[in-house]
Image (spheres, rainbow, N blue to C red):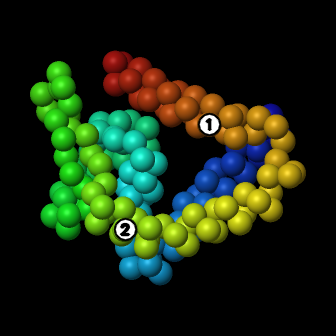
Amino acid sequence: MDDMREGIRTITKCVCAIDGAYVGLAKKRGVKSNLLWLLYILDDGKPHSQKQICEKWLFPKTTINTLIKECQSEGYVTLQAISGQRRELLIQLTEKGQAYVRHVLRPVYEAEEEVMHQLMPCCPPGFLSWLEQYTDNLKDTFKNRENRKEET
């Protein structure tokens, strides 16, 4: 039990430290950390809805809504209706947004790639899949426990 608890603490400490590193870099780039994350999410070349972003990345809806409005007013994103959806919109980067993303995220991507090149040779096969599964299961378990708590 102690080894498992220590392993969980190590994962949690690493997650917090990783997040802190991104927050620190965002500050140095003069960008709010939540904006950095939104740009990071949108820079995968795929359209996303606000709902998808909130569900996958666990951002509060109000935070994402505010950021999207700011990005839209700056000309960084466009919003497009989704066929069959009344209120959900697709968010996509404009050319201006893509240029801004390249400026803001270039040092992030360079640092991430440098670290991955250093560590991938010693990364156990399947580790990234395991980490993704751990994350998904933890999110679901927290949510399920909260739902059960609300029912009682």
The label on residue 68 is none
Q: Would residue 141 be visible to someone looking at this image?
A: yes
Q: Residue furthest right?
A: 122
Residue 65, image x, y percentages: 22, 50
Q: Residues within 10 Å of mark 2 (few under 14, many from 20)?
A: few
At horizontal 53% and vertical 27% (from top left) the residue drawn is: 141
Residue 7, image x, y percentages: 76, 44
At horizontal 34% and vertical 41% (from top left) the residue drawn is: 47
Q: Is residue 113 left or right of residue 149?
A: right
Question: Looking at the image, is 150 positioned above or below residue 59?
Answer: above
Q: Considering only order in the chain, which callout, 1 or 2, is on the residue closer to the N terminus?
A: 2
Q: Which quadrant of the figure has residue 54?
A: top left
Pick the quarter of the image with the C terminus: top left
Q: How many marks?
A: 2
Residue 52, image x, y percentages: 35, 36
Q: Would residue 66 be visible to someone looking at this image?
A: no
Q: Is residue 82 left or right of residue 10?
A: left
- Identify which amino acid the numbered label 2 is placed on: Ala
- Identify which amino acid the numbered label 1 is placed on: Glu
